[in-house]
Amino acid sequence: MSSVPPSPPIKDSSQRIAVNTLSFTTPAEVKLWITEQAQQLGFSACGFLSVHHPLFAEQMIYLERWLDKGYEGTLGFMHNNHHLRAHPEQLVAGAKTIISVRMDYLTEAPVPRTVEDNAYPNQGIIARYARGRDYHKTMRSRLKQLALKIESMLPAWQHLAIGAESDFVFRPFSDSAPIFERPIADAAGLGWTGKHTLLLNKQAGSFFVLGELFISLALPEDNPVTDHCGSCTACIDICPTQAIVAPYELNAAACISYLTIEHDGVIDTKYRRAIGNRVFGCDDCQLICPWNRYASITCVADFEPRHNLDNSSLLELWQWTETTFLENTQGSPLRRTGYLNFLRNVALGLGNANPDKLIIEALRSRLGHHNDMLDEHIIWAINEQQLKLRTPLA
């Protein structure tokens, strides 16, 4: 285990960037102004990278090796549009710079170095980023606002030879195109890639989401930061399904986030107990990370939990009708799973919960009412409950 990370620099409002918007003498001042505007829009940080950076060719080599191992599961889109991943300038014609942004999403600080979720086996655990509104729309909307702010300043920048005199081109992205999102943020200095393959930041941990704004201005690139994981393997050791097969290498097909969100249909029995009470996603590798003692609290209201999604029992979630599901997931990331896969996940959670005859009764009440896939998981959950109650199997 590595030594305790050093304390981060003190955050002081007096350190906020201040730029004289009436007089810009260098492209670096333009970047400072853009950064301040991004912060005012709720982005915690931003970095700048050329669309021609060599990382794209390097990442294509890594991606192809990763795909050869079958780690993508059923994520077939990972095989598509490789020419756009390798050449982002083709994704947005005329773009020269990618602005990578970070948006924090924690609404309360986690307990340092514990996976507190595991202490509540009868609660339905939903990943923290997904308890409020769908961040994708929030991210793209605010990136568009940032782009319009930039566009309004073009007359003041035309003497800087950054392309401000030409027609302004921009396009915001948030997990919505074939983009090497995390490697871009890494190369742009927003953090380093941790052993769990998520981005880490010394002042903010990893509880944040990323977005990109492609623009036609040619701005200086930022530099990457150094890796600070050291000898720590906490994320690898804690992973319930051992999906982190090696430092910096994830078998997505075994990851609980993939299994409970992206995977459609039957979940392999070898993962069912390990999934525990996680209904949508998993935060274990983040919660255990020592750098998340510095995790930042969000200033974006959209991440506030809705419909008691931060404190719902599995039995409560099991009672949701399809109408309730659609109402409670309107504008929410949870809608991505679909109703039957949502019930599938809750059924597994009930099977893994503390033994209770009421749980068995609740599970049986849904048998035969949906489809064979869900029935298979219900029967598995009933058997798990009965095993723990030491009664004959169903």
Image: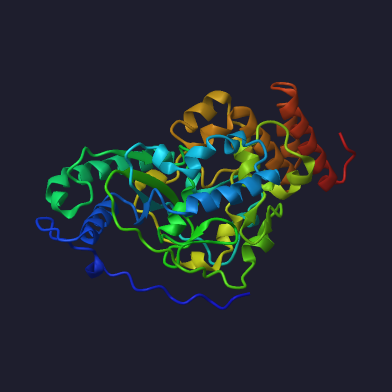
Q: How is the image coloured?
A: rainbow
In screen coordinates, is 314 left or right of 183? right
The image shows a total of numbered marks equal to 0
Q: Position of residue 281 (x, y in %)?
A: 59, 45
Q: In terms of depth relative to the viewer, which is nearer, 312 or 281?
A: 281
Question: Residue at 77% across / 31% down in the picture?
Answer: 376
Q: Is residue 249 above or below residue 167?
A: below
Q: In terms of depth relative to the viewer, which is nearer, 34 or 312?
A: 34
Q: Is residue 326 above or below residue 4?
A: above
Question: Residue at 79% across / 45% down in the picture?
Answer: 270
Q: Position of residue 207 (x, y in %)?
A: 48, 56
Viewport quadrant of the C terminus: top right
Question: Residue at 60% across / 61% down in the picture?
Answer: 195
Q: Position of residue 339 (x, y in %)?
A: 59, 28
Q: Position of residue 263 (x, y in %)?
A: 65, 36
Q: Is residue 93 above or below residue 181?
A: above
Viewport quadrant of the N terminus: bottom right
Residue reaching furthest to the left: 22
| Residue 108 appearing in the image | no
- Image quarter for residue 346? top right
Q: In terms of depth relative to the viewer, which is nearer, 310 or 203?
A: 203
Question: Residue at 24% across / 52% down in the picture?
Answer: 37
In screen coordinates, is 368 left or right of 48? right
Residue reaching furthest to the right: 392
| Residue 158 appearing in the image | yes
